[in-house]
Amino acid sequence: MGRAALVVSAGVLLSRILGLLREVALADLIGANAAGDAYRVAFIIPDFLNYLLAGGYMAITFIPILSRHFANDDDAGAWEAFVAVARPVGLAMAVLVGIGMLAAGPVIGAVTSLSPEDVTEATRLTRIILPAQFFFVTGTLLMAVQYARERFLIPTLAPIVYNLMIILGGLLMTDRNDPSAEGFAWGVLAGAIIGNFLIQAYGAFREGLRLPSGVPLANPVVREYLLLALPLMLGQSLVVLDESFARVFGTQLGEGPTSQLGFARQTMLVPIGVVAQAAGVAAYPYLSRLVEEGKLREMTVALARAVRYVVVASLVATATLVALSIPTIRALFERGQFGPADTVASASALVFYALGIPFWGVQQLLARGFYARRQMWTPVLVGTATTILAVPVYIIFKELLDIRGIALASTVSIAGYTVVLGAIWIDRTGAHVLAGLAQTVGRALVPAVIAGGAAWLVAYAVADIATGFPGAVLQVVAGGLAAGAVFLGLAGWMGTMKSVQDD
């Protein structure tokens, strides 16, 4: 699991770097303005359709089915299962894309506070992006074949190619004198086709995928898949809708905050992706296999250890990002159409977003623990309840703190979701994991806070030496190195990593 996590982590790190470069290109060419807001709003309907078919969880629901066939040396049964599931899923998404094309304008006008002109632009961009969802969901099934074989390299290429195509589309098709995000939207479609579908088809066929004919429409695996996926389709998970909340409530603050929140949130996602997403993706097939083999205690121990690793890394990331929020945003985005005022606004949001990193990380692992045990309803019911409660939280905090309030509402909501999910997991698997987690948090929190303070002091000192972009980069590099050195020294002295490895 650790070796797989390293492969996935390297791929996620590269994709997150490219994701940041994508945001850098957006900031430079488009900026935090009406055009940028329209581009981000254009993802509301596509993301919802993807979620409606459990697109984000499709691999999670399909991997156990494929793993069972592979464990029984029944490759032919696995390929029949693939065809049986891919056929209705692909057809359903094609129908939903058509409906989305027709309904885009009225829906965007109803859920956002954009001007009529910006609604028209967002609708146009939505219709460019929407077909990408077909290639996302079918491509995810192709990735599931590779994950079930415990092959991770080619699936990690999907977000890398996706981000590259968006960057290329933006660079080739954006006019600085009349900025529009149309080039970025076409890049989304190209990235989905190439990275998420064509390359994944190659990877799946390389692992032996065949498309048998004559698979009955009423194949029993379809019912099995629907029973696993239905809870994820019906539930409204905060994990998926959080970004849409930022887009919807951001438009209520006027022109710019939606884009500023997007830049801050994308920055926050880098450590989450590298640490938690990599651990979750790599761990899930392994955890599923342990469940299939009836090794539930080993599965619980493995998940608990992964959670402790993620907690330690997340606390360091939180402290460092909070301390270096302004130079980080300035170094990444302050150029072209993105000015100093945008930096201050995005950095203020980043501080509150960063506080949620440990909760995002733990949630990703806990949810996969439930999915591996085929307890799909638990995360869904908790997530749906949290999503309903999150709406008034967003409204209240937005009124109190504007853009910072939206970011804080995100953190408060994901924290509540994670705490409740964790309490249920401990109740079902045993409280013995709680002592180990509490010990790890205790031994990691103090070094992380002191490391964050060291990062801030170093960055503050560097600010007197260099200014502008070079100064911001120097602040981030020097502050980050200081945080790492201080944390490693204190963590070694306090035995932080030893607490992670204890069962």
Image: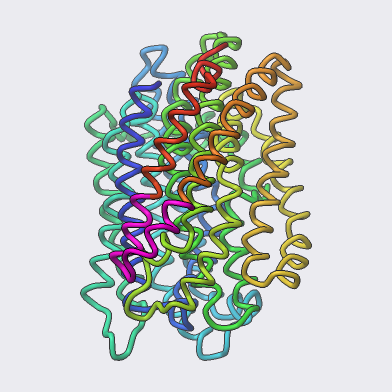
Q: How many numbered discs, if any?
A: 0
Residue 253 relative to residue 81: left or right: right
> Residue at (54%, 37%) from the top-left corner?
448
Relative depth, front residue between 293 and 92: 293
Question: Is residue 89 something that shows in the picture?
Answer: yes
Write down the quadrant of residue 470 in the picture: bottom left
**Colour mapping:** rainbow
> Residue at (28%, 32%) from the top-left corner?
210
Q: Is residue 495 above or below residue 27?
A: above
Q: Quadrant of the N terminus?
A: top left
Q: Is residue 16 above or below residue 70?
A: below
Relative depth, front residue between 200 and 468: 468
Report x, y in % for residue 428. Answer: 73, 20
Report x, y in % for residue 115. Answer: 57, 88
Question: Is residue 196 something that shows in the picture?
Answer: no
Relative depth, front residue between 27 and 82: 27
Q: Quadrant of the C terminus?
A: top right
Relative depth, front residue between 292 and 364: 364
Give the prevailing secondary structure in the magenta stretch: helix
Magenta span: 457-478
Write down the quadrant of residue 281 in the picture: top left
Examine the structure image and report whether residue 378 is included in the region drawn in magenta: no
Q: Is residue 320 above or below residue 242?
A: above
Report x, y in % for residue 21. Answer: 31, 61
Examine the structure image and report whether residue 473 is included in the region drawn in magenta: yes
> Residue at (55%, 51%) from the top-left corner?
354
Report x, y in % for residue 454. Answer: 48, 45
